[in-house]
Image (spheres, helix red, strand yellow):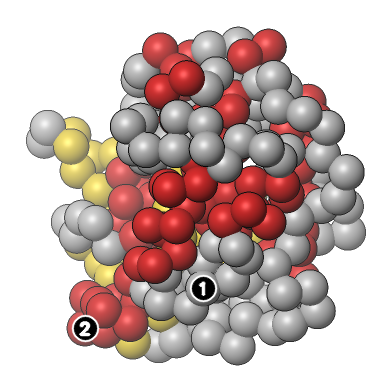
Amino acid sequence: MGTSESSSAQADSAGPVDRIPSPAVGSSLTNARELRAIGLEGVRDDRVLFTGLNFAVDPGGVIQIEGPNGCGKTTLLRMVCGFVLPDEGEITWGGEEIQSIRPEYQSSVSYLGHTSGIKEDLTAGENLHVARRLAAISAMEPVEALEAVGLRGFETAMVRTLSAGQRRRVALARMLVSDAPLWVMDEPFTALDPRGVKMVEGMLMNHCQRGGIAIITTHHPVDLGDQPVTLLNLADWGEQAC
């Protein structure tokens, strides 16, 4: 993990967030489908991380993946994204195995990893313009997305000059310029102050209210108001638990 990820929440020095971001407020994500995992097994260095894992989430649902360090949370997220194949089992989107509909499925996924995944030699605005151009269905304009995450006026700021918390906010803004129905988020609260945590929770609530799906890992409690959050503890699916 890079130093920017382990920085304290005090590094998040973005300005106040006056509204909860929600692209196309009131519009539905009509391309959302049921996401289902069937008999998943993940192995790393000949060690079984989890096996026989099953879950399903419908549009509008949230799954929070928990478990101790090294239990395979990031591995599972990468499987959900289609970056790596499960050692056993399959993942389906709308009843179809994701590798069989790979282009369509990957256009439906927006991923936030441990690292922010933004280019340090570009400005915040340029990073978002690139992400918006690559999105299958675009949503917020870059300026609007930056304002939504508390970075109004940072469009021309070089990413390398930003604090860890501000970089994380740029990465989160990248999710708002795309209308992908499936959000996969690995420790989304990293480097954020309490206001930033509330902002992410607001993003998640609005995404799900529009019919989107969110799969997240975090060691922090998640408060999404009336939005149910399904907890999935990977330790229950480890080899010793079977």
Q: How many numbered callouts? A: 2
Which image quarter is the N terminus in? Answer: top left
Q: Residue at x 32, y 51 (%)?
A: 78
Report the Cα–Cα distance between label 1 and label 2.
Answer: 24 Å
Which image quadrant is residue 26 in?
bottom right
Q: Is residue 147 left or right of residue 232?
A: right
Local secondary structure at mark 2: helix
Q: Residue at x 25, y 48 (%)?
A: 42
Count residues near mark 1 (Cα–Cα under 10 Å), then give few for <14, some for 14-19, many for 20+.
some
Q: Is residue 155 left or right of residue 120?
A: right
What amino acid type is highlighted by mark number 2?
Ser
**Residue 109 badge:** none
Count residues near mark 2 (Cα–Cα under 10 Å), then give few for <14, some for 14-19, many for 20+.
few
Residue at the disc numbered 2 = 100
Q: Which of the pair 137/242 is nearer the observer?
A: 137
Q: Residue at x 82, y 39 (%)?
A: 17
Q: Position of residue 79 (x, y in %)?
A: 30, 56
Q: Is residue 223 left or right of residue 162?
A: right
Which image quadrant is residue 47 in?
top left
Q: Is residue 214 left or right of residue 1?
A: right
Q: Residue furthest front?
A: 156
What amino acid type is highlighted by mark number 1?
Ser
> Does residue 92 sit above or below 83 in this rendering?
below
Q: Residue at x 38, y 57 (%)?
A: 130
> Does residue 28 sit above or below 10 in this rendering?
below
Q: Which of the pair 54/23 is nearer the observer?
A: 23
Local secondary structure at mark 1: loop
Asked if residue 228 can be seen in this view, the reply is no
Camera-near label (1 vs 2) is: 1
Q: Which of the pair 64/81 is nearer the observer?
A: 81
Residue at the disc numbered 1 = 138
